[in-house]
Image (cartoon, rainbow, N blue to C red):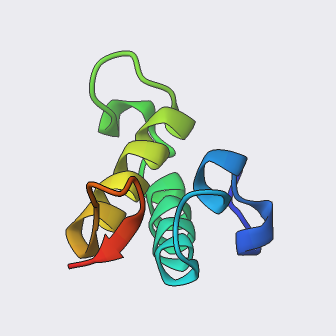
Amino acid sequence: MPYKAISDLPDSVRNHLPTHAQDIYKEAFNHAWDEYADENERRGDESREEAAHKVAWAAVKKQYSKGSDGEWHAR
């Protein structure tokens, strides 16, 4: 299920990531959702949604890291 707006993202994303990181997450998730529609494109037994969430978190982690204060900061 692609996300139309960052307000549609899961609480675990909206409540912990800065707005820009949320936008990165949404765009990466939506792209991966389309990319991994065919289950032969996914690894193992993971669902389309699991694959898309993994891709989205990886995209966020390229530009943000979780600091010792528990908050996410731009790299």
The reply, left or right, for residue 42 in relation to residue 50 is left
Residue 30, quarter of the rendered image: bottom right
Closer to us: 57 or 19: 19
Residue 7 lies left or right of residue 60; in this view the side is right
Asked which quadrant contains residue 44, the reply is top left
Image position, residue 10 (x, y; %) = 70, 49
> In the image, residue 34 lies at what x, y percent?
52, 58
**Nearer-the-camera pick, 15 or 68:** 68
Total marks shown come to 0
The image quadrant of residue 68 is bottom left
Residue under the image location 43 percent in, 31 percent down: 39
Relative to 41, 52 lies left or right: right
Residue 29 image offset from top left, x and y in percent? 51, 59
Return the residue nearer the eye: 63 or 28.
Answer: 63
Which of the image's four quarters has the C terminus? Answer: bottom left
For this view, does 2 lie left or right of residue 23?
A: right
**Measuring 71% from the left and 49% from the top, which residue is drawn there?**
11
Residue at the location (62% across, 46% down)?
12
Image location of residue 40, percent across then percent down: 34, 31
Q: Residue furthest front?
A: 69
Tell me the residue at 75%/75% (across/down).
5
* Vertical arrangement, residue 40 with respect to residue 28, above or below: above
In front here: 55 or 61? Answer: 61
